[in-house]
Amino acid sequence: MNLPNKLTMARVVAVPFFIAAYMTGYYIIAFVLFIAASFTDMLDGKIARKRNLITNFGKIMDPLADKVLVYSAFCLMVGDGTIPGWMLIVILAREFAIAGMRTVAASEGNVIAAGMSGKIKTVLQMIAVPLLLLVPAIPEGQFHTIIWWLAQIFLWASLIMTVYSGIEYIAKNKSVFAQ
């Protein structure tokens, strides 16, 4: 297994530890784990492209690892009321729709590549989650309020980009539905 794939697997392995830290109220540890795991996402892609180590395993596992990490966090946050459940439903509906389109396209020998709007969506989510993790970890006060507002801005921006990128994927690939 090459280094980028090891980094991807490290992200997957970090998820249960992130979940345990979050569920036991160790939000700073959860924050550090999430940031470290997010960093591996950026790093594995750069290394894979630079060293020409792109593999089918990486093509499948890298986006899956991102989704497991981010959506685990969102599920936990719905569970404790940090974010509303309907937001997670919108996010997951988009993911299932795109995954379904990609599956149908692949069965016809076509590949639907990730678009820039989908990548921006992921980045916004990976910023929103750590900010949301900091909110319960910071004592009430001006800094707490600033972090709360930043978390809300990035959460809503990621939701808007989720919807936009989903519409864009469907519009650009509507021929998948005609097959």
Image: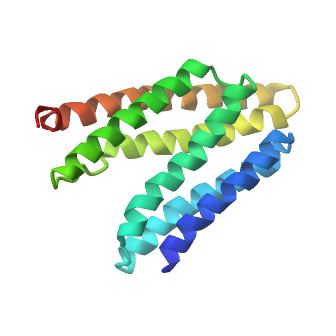
With respect to residue 102, does 77 lie above or below? Answer: above
Corner quadrant of residue 74: top right
Tell me where residue 158 appears, x and y as whole percent.
Answer: 49, 32
* Count of numbered tags: 0
Corner quadrant of residue 87: top right
* 157, 164: nearer the viewer: 164
Q: Could you tell me which quadrant the C terminus lies in?
A: top left
Q: Which residue is located at x 44 percent, y 53 percent?
A: 63
Q: Which residue is located at x 32 percent, y 45 percent?
A: 116
The answer to whether residue 2 is left or right of residue 82 is left
With respect to residue 137, does 31 lie above or below? Answer: below
Q: Which residue is located at x 57 percent, y 66 percent?
A: 9
Display coloring: rainbow
* 28, 91: nearer the viewer: 91
The answer to whether residue 118 is left or right of residue 175 is right
Corner quadrant of residue 172: top left
Tell me where residue 100 appears, x and y as whole percent.
Answer: 32, 39
Tell me where residue 72 appears, x and y as whole percent.
Answer: 63, 42
Tell me where residue 77 appears, x and y as whole percent.
Answer: 69, 31
Q: Which residue is located at x 42 percent, y 66 percent?
A: 58
